[in-house]
Amino acid sequence: MAIGTKAMPFSFVAHFLGIIGAIMVLIWCISFRGGLAWEATNKNLIFNIHPVLMLIGLVIIGGEAIMSYKCLPLKKPEKKLIHLVLHAIALILGIIGIYTAFKFHNESNIANLYSLHSWLGIGVIVLYGIQWIYGFLIFFYPGGTTTIRSESLPWHVLFGIFMYILAVGTATLGYLEKLTFLQNSGLAKYGAEAFLVNFTAIVTILFGVFVFLTILSQPPQEDEYSYSAI
């Protein structure tokens, strides 16, 4: 399936939504939740690192890595390197983000891995790591044979799309879980913070939608290095 529209307009909307989403999650965690800290008496400040890194890392930078193959009018080596590096940054930030959630739970005497959000989150980061390592070995260094690369590419793309959709869904589930905890602790259900969290989740979903539209649309110039239409 492919869309006749050029990828660039969709990618511009995605870039804009990514910036808005990053700003919104920072406002939430800094202005409403008290800030970010690696070590603090108030353990909630440690947790606040988690949504910031997961959204900016796995979802936004990960989405930019996916779109780089469709919206950048570059040759194969440049696009491959940008794709690889952005995914590596997203993976590292995601690992740190998950670590901060465990750190918060352990220092607050809260059980780990009891929710669907946490199960999916671990699944996403493990799959992301496997996908990156496989891509590095087959498409970058040492590199597979031409046959292996050509046969692996469609599955690499398809698995990457599946994993990214799962990441966006897991992030959305995380907003719901955290907001539910806060509302059960007395946060106003129709207050400014509740609306901010819900709208951040909506922006996250819309960003994912426009990433998907970008990769289904036409690149700036058709060449042998672009993803094939699905």
Image (cartoon, rainbow, N blue to C red):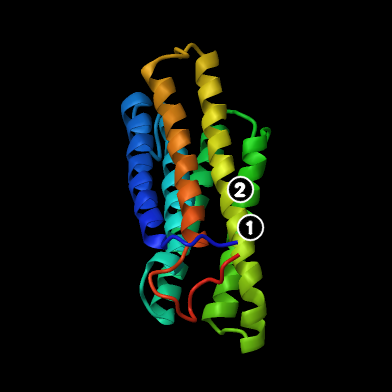
Left or right of 159 on screen, residue 206: left
Q: How many marks?
A: 2
Figure quadrant of the C terminus: bottom right
Residue appearing at x 63%, y 55% in the figure:
162
Residue at the image point whose x is 62% and y is 84% from the top: 144
In this rendered view, identify the residue nearer to me: 216 or 35: 216
Residue drawn 40% across the image and 70% down it: 82
Question: Of the residues shown, which amino acid type is indicated by label 1?
Answer: Leu
Residue 166 spot, x, y in % from top left? 61, 48
Q: Is residue 36 visible?
A: no
In the current view of this chain or complex, which residue is farthest to the front? 4
Q: Are marks 2 and 1 in contact (CB under 8 Å)?
A: yes
Provide the residue designation for mark 1: 127
Q: Which mark is residue 166?
A: 2
Q: Secondary structure at mark 2?
A: helix
Closest to the observer, 49 or 75: 75
Q: In the image, what residue type sits under mark 2?
A: Leu
Q: Left or right? Give the position of 209 relative to 159.
A: left
Crowd band around label 1 with a 10 angstrom C-alpha radius: few (<14), some (14–19), many (20+): some
Q: Nearer the viewer, mark 2 or mark 1?
A: 2
Q: Is residue 124 above or below residue 185?
A: below
Question: Horizontal and vertical percent for residue 51?
Answer: 46, 39
Above or below 37: residue 73: below
Question: To which quarter of the image does residue 199 belong?
Answer: top left
- Identify the element where label 1 is drawn: helix
